């Protein structure tokens, strides 16, 4: 116990989201310090609350390990003459304070040199800590730092007390004008008194003063308190992702209260009520089965009483009152009448307004919808038309905590007006998936509008010069494209993407802008390539299929999967690839024209042509059925004939007619391979 | 037009009212050595606009000042229907430069002084990094929650008018109505007792309603656009002539005119951003001039 170190940085309230990273960065800094100073210890324990960052370093060595520094001296050749030390060597030894006998000769680089080994003074851990702790604290990482006192120290929030104890001894260090001591403070509201501590009683003493310093323990206790409290009304809490972590880092000791609100607010859409509780107030909503209840849980930092409950209820009521105000005012304007209001809201720079965007979405959605089986085009069109109207509502424009509910709000206004559910679903789901974890649109119609929305965002942003570069992607185009790909693959939608982009460019009156088209194409190929690889497709196969089929992502994926399948037999696959490469290598870019049967003279060329013609219908049949594995396997049938041709016939013969016809034959054969992908991109390991 | 406003009868037993809270805060900070300042005369969106804070926070000279400020945020009005949202409200503003070591404790003591038993409430310092885009000012700090209700903005200013501050000052901005509602046990701002004989509604409700109608429905948009531009050029002209205070006054007027245009819904997203940028430029210019003239 007398070899444990406690360091506690007492602060004013640090933001909950900063704490975990900060303590890890603090620990890392200490590990580096101890490692470079050869100070051993068994482990570093991490603790924090909003008002303190603390570590306990267990079983630290009281002194450094032996540190030897080597100093390079004169070259060996000049150090000794006839086996005796030269003047130069003696001078070196005396300047370093070592005896000539203790010097060694080592090869440094390519030269032999004299080396003096100097044992540094072994210093005490106490000295090392006192000297370096401030710079370790200075290097703790926070998203934002501030200054507050005259030494201009910067930290997340002001440092107000500072504990550094080794065993029972206070180590004397000052940070930001605060001197170290063995005194900490308890819970601000319940036990805000000075407490003398040491490494062994730290956790216990603070717990007695209503501070749980271990974040894991605090969270566990909070969770069980919440569950216990709601079980009193036979309900369950709703834990949205991240909320429990955040709330347990907003308090030093968890107490919970169960509050209630007027049932009339439950006529508002569920997500609105939940947002009112979660977004700003950080309350936990409560449900019975799937039904939302007029109750909430709030975690507080003080012992509960009626007044605290009443205060919290009042605040939530005010927020719900606000939501109800929006809900009622917004509903006075039917959502169809809101379409024209979209013209008053600008989209991003130089790209016109949201009405124009809606009109494009309608046309693009219709275009995609016409290329999709079993789809209700009327729902697609109407859904697209209404997809952005909620951006004109007060709930979205004005209602701070509800702005993240776009889509959902539009659909709920639609439902309240009795709009068909399929259309409401398009409005609600066309933003999905918002991120990697988010679910997909729940209907084909919504999926189609989501695709249109995404492509219009991408095309528009490229036109406005807002393409992603490096880590900068202000309009989230990468995420938009990832969602686009996910929808295509999951809904198995195949349509020519290049045409869709051209159509959107035309709608932006930029149909002739070839440069932008190429830029968008490059962006898409890069994103699809990444997506394919994340699905286990080899990079070269991804490149090969995208070079032929980038504009049909669904087919590209299926071909790539088939290629991976065929590749399982690497030897066979290799032969296939080499066969096609032999064909390609000899060909020039120019199309030599049709094969003239009469000019096929040699047996080998006749055979290859016949075989190729023979497999062509089957090949095309399998492609139509999207059975690409079987299709590629057909190609294997002609491979021996390719080899035969090259081994026995001179393609580049002097007879120009024959030569051209042979090239035409090979060109034809290659075109069969290219029905799948560009085999030249395949790399044989 | 609307029906006659209703007046809520005050409950007799309550003895804490708005003016008590205000007077007690004033007394507390005066006792702590603050100079008691006065509210500004042009319409401001927050106490920060008052030259006592805007210029006072610049430079090295120590400053401890406290004052009430009538703040106007046209967009926040609700036609006096929502008991928590008003287009005009009262802030109590305290500026402490340099920020004292025990400023959080001082703040909590001030709450006790206005008879809040802090041991019986949940008081929380919740992260809220304050920024005034129009003033080119920002700082780190919290909103202080009392039982879930935000009652104070607590900020360590880092920059004002685009200028890094040294020393750093602490700004405390109390929401007086909210605190008074809590302490008096009123159900809404309407029945908040202001004094022994008047409620908030008696003094403010009709005015609140009429200003909402003006802000949202009646304000002449064209006239406002013109006035915004006039204020802008007047600010530049005067600041350049070293008439800093009148110049800055026009910056404040430009800012309020912008707020009115915003409430009228007359600005597109882009226009809105541009207007904010323009005001910030003016504020930065004023701050720079202050440094040039006085530090």
Image: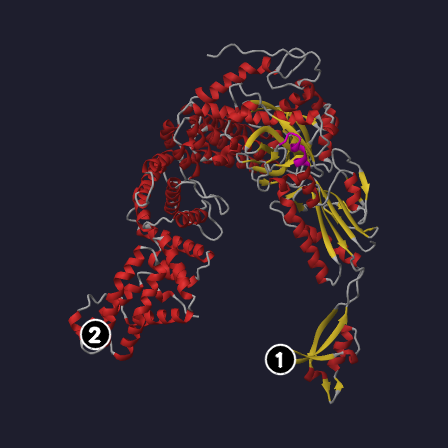
Identify the element where label 2 is drawn.
helix
Quadrant of the rendered image containing residue B199: top right
Identify the element where label 1 is drawn.
loop
Tell me if A231 is positioned left or right of B208 in this view: right
- Give the residue furthest to the bottom: A82
Q: Residue A486 or A235: which is nearer the viewer?
A: A235
Q: Residue visible at 46% across and 46% down?
A: A476
Quadrant of the frame with the C terminus of chain A: bottom left
Residue linked to disc 1: A110
Residue A384 location (% of width, % of height): 36, 37
Residue linked to disc 2: A659
Tell me if A207 is positioned left or right of A603 in this view: right
Res. B187 visible in picture = yes
Q: Residues within 10 Å of mark 2 (few under 14, many from 20)?
A: some
Same chain for labels 2 and 1? Say yes or no.
yes
Would you say the magenta stretch is mainly helix, strand or loop? helix
Q: Which mark is residue A325?
A: none
């Amino acid at each position: 116990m007398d070899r444990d170190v406690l360091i506690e940085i007492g602060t004013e309230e640090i933001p909950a989201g900063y704490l975990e990273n900060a303590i890890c960065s603090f620990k890392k800094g200490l590990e580096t310090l101890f490692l470079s100073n050869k100070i051993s210890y068994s482990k570093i324990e991490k603790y924090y609350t909003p008002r303190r960052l603390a570590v306990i370093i267990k079983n630290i060595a009281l002194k450094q390990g032996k540190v030897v520094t080597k100093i390079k001296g004169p070259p060996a050749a000049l150090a000794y003459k006839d086996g005796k030390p030269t003047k130069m060597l003696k001078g070196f030894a005396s300047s370093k304070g070592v005896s000539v006998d203790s010097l060694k000769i080592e090869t440094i680089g390519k030269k032999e040199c004299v080396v003096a080994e100097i044992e540094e003074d072994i210093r005490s851990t106490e000295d090392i800590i006192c000297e370096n702790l401030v710079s370790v604290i200075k290097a703790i990482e926070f998203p934002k730092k501030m200054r507050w006192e005259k030494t201009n120290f910067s930290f997340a929030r002001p440092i107000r007390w500072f504990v550094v104890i080794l065993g029972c001894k206070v180590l004397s260090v000052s940070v930001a004008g605060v001197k170290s001591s063995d005194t900490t403070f308890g819970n601000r509201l319940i036990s805000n008194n000075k407490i003398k501590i040491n490494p062994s009683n730290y956790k216990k003493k603070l717990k007695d003063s209503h501070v749980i310093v271990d974040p894991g323990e605090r969270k566990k206790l909070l969770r069980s308190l919440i569950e216990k409290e709601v079980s009193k009304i036979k309900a369950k809490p709703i834990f949205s992702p991240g909320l429990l972590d955040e709330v347990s880092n907003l308090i030093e000791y968890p107490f919970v209260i169960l509050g209630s609100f007027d049932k009339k607010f439950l006529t508002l859409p569920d997500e609105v009520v939940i947002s009112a509780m979660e977004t700003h107030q950080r309350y936990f909503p409560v449900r019975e089965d799937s039904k939302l209840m007029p109750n909430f849980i709030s975690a507080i930092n003080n012992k509960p009483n009626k007044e605290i409950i009443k205060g919290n209820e009042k605040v939530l009521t005010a927020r719900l009152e606000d939501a109800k105000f929006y809900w009622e005012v917004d509903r006075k304007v039917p959502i169809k009448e809101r379409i024209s209001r979209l013209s008053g809201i600008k989209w991003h720079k130089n790209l016109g307004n949201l009405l124009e965007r809606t009109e494009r979405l309608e046309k693009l959605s219709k275009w995609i919808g016409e290329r999709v089986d079993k789809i209700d085009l009327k729902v697609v069109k109407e859904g697209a038309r209404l997809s952005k109207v909620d951006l004109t509502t007060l709930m979205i424009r004005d209602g701070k905590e509800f702005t993240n509910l776009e889509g959902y709000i539009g659909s709920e206004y639609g439902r309240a007006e009795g709009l068909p559910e399929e259309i409401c679903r398009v409005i609600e789901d066309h933003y999905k998936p918002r991120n990697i974890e988010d679910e997909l649109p729940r209907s084909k119609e919504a999926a189609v509008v989501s695709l249109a929305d995404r492509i219009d965002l991408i095309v528009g942003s490229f036109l406005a010069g807002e393409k992603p570069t490096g880590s900068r992607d202000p309009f989230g185009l990468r995420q938009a494209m990832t969602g686009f790909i996910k929808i295509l693959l999951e809904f198995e939608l195949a349509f020519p993407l290049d045409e869709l982009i051209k159509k959107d460019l035309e709608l932006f009156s930029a149909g002739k802008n070839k440069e932008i088209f190429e830029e968008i194409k490059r962006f898409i190929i890069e994103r699809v390539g990444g997506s394919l690889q994340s699905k286990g497709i080899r990079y070269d196969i991804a490149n090969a299929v995208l070079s032929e089929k980038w504009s049909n992502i669904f087919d590209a994926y299926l071909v790539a999967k088939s290629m991976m399948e065929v590749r399982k037999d690497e030897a066979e696959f290799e032969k296939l690839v080499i066969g096609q490469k032999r064909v390609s290598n000899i060909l020039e870019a120019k199309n030599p024209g049709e094969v003239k049967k009469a000019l096929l003279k040699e047996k080998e060329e006749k055979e290859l042509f016949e075989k190729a013609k023979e497999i062509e219908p089957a090949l095309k049949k399998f492609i139509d059925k999207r059975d690409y594995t079987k299709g590629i396997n057909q190609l294997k049938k002609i491979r021996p004939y390719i080899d035969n041709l090259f081994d026995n016939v001179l393609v580049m013969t002097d007879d120009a007619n024959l030569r051209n016809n042979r090239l035409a034959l090979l060109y034809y054969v290659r075109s069969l391979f290219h029905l799948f992908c560009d085999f030249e991109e395949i790399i044989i390991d | 037009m609307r029906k006659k406003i209703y007046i809520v009868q005050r409950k007799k037993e309550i003895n804490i009212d708005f003016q008590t809270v205000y007077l007690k805060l004033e007394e507390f900070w005066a006792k702590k050595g603050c100079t008691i300042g006065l509210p500004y005369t042009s319409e401001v969106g927050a106490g920060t606009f008052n030259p006592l804070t805007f210029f006072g926070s610049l430079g090295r000279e120590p400053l401890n000042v406290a004052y009430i400020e009538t703040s106007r945020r046209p967009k926040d009005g609700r036609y006096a229907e929502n008991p928590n949202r008003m287009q005009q409200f009262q802030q109590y503003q305290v500026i402490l430069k340099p920020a004292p070591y025990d400023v959080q404790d001082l703040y909590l003591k001030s709450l006790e002084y206005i008879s809040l038993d802090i041991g019986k409430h949940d008081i929380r310092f919740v992260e809220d990094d304050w920024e005034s885009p129009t003033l080119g000012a920002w700082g780190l700090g919290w909103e202080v929650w009392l039982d879930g209700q935000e009652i104070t903005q607590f900020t360590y200013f880092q920059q004002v008018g685009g200028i890094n501050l040294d020393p750093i000052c602490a700004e405390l901005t109390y929401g007086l109505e909210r605190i008074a509602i809590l302490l008096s046990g009123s159900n809404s701002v309407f029945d908040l007792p202001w004094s022994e004989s008047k409620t908030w509604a008696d003094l403010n409700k009709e005015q609140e309603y009429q200003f909402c109608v003006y802000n949202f429905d009646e304000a002449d948009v064209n006239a406002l656009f013109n006035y915004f531009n006039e204020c802008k050029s007047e600010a530049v002209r005067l600041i350049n002539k070293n008439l800093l205070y009148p110049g800055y006054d026009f910056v404040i007027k430009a800012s309020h005119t912008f707020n009115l245009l915003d409430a009228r819904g007359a600005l597109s997203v882009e226009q809105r951003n541009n207007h904010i940028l323009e005001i910030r430029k003016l504020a930065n210019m004023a701050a720079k001039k202050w440094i040039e003239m006085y530090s």
